Amino acid sequence: MEWFNEPRQWADGDVLRVVADAQTDLWQKTHYGYSTDTGHIYGRTVSGDVTVRATFSADYAEQYDQAGGALRIDAENWIKAGTEFVDGALHISVVVTRGFSDWSVLRAPGLPESVTIELERAGDAVTVRYGLDGGAPSEMLRLAYFPPGEPALAGVMCAAPVGKGFETRFTHVEIT
């Protein structure tokens, strides 16, 4: 396992605890007009099909605090999926970037204690599924194109675009 943008505070044991550094994000151009590639991703590089599954909870505090899973080829080709704190509520979200970022978002029912996110890369597509409070990731959220065969960092991510940082606890991380 390796870091892309290693955070100042993290510990790996039975639980992977990561404190997202302040002012970190992954985004390219669309709507906001800026590009940033400072979010934290912890994983391993794979060349072909892969499934990333992570169960996590976090201490969301500020607008756009986010955590989940990611697949990253480079600064302009990546997918992040998980949770995002938007307008005072938790949302399930996916950002797909191929030069420009797009954002899909769905308000989470209530405030789940944990979320399980799954990104399944098969050929030229990634299927994103999620589950709440220990449930299997059975709800499909997105199917997106992703360049096949390109080596990609597959793992978990978090970022704090406008806040001071926040802690995420990954209780299960599987990259197969």
Image: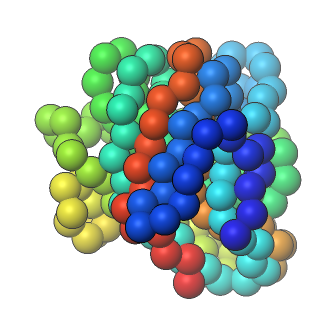
Q: Residue furthest left?
A: 110
Q: Nearer the viewer, residue 120 or 6?
A: 6
In this view, 6 is above or below 38:
below
For the point 54% across and 25% down, the residue is: 165
Q: Quadrant of residue 32?
A: top right
How is the rendered protein coloured? rainbow
Q: Quadrant of residue 93?
A: top left
Left or right: 45 as drawn, with respect to 56: right
Residue 36 in percent (x, y) is at: 78, 29
Q: Nearer the viewer, residue 155 or 32?
A: 155
Using the rendered image of the protein, determine whether residue 101 is visible from the camera's viewpoint: no
Left or right: 175 as drawn, with respect to 150: left
| Total count of labels | 0
For the point 56% across and 77% down, the residue is: 175
Residue 57 in percent (x, y) is at: 34, 46
For the point 46% across and 18% down, the residue is: 63
For the point 83% across and 45% down, the residue is: 75
Which quadrant: the C terminus? bottom right
In this view, 1 is above or below 95:
below
Q: Quadrant of residue 141?
A: bottom left
In this view, 139 is above or below 160:
below
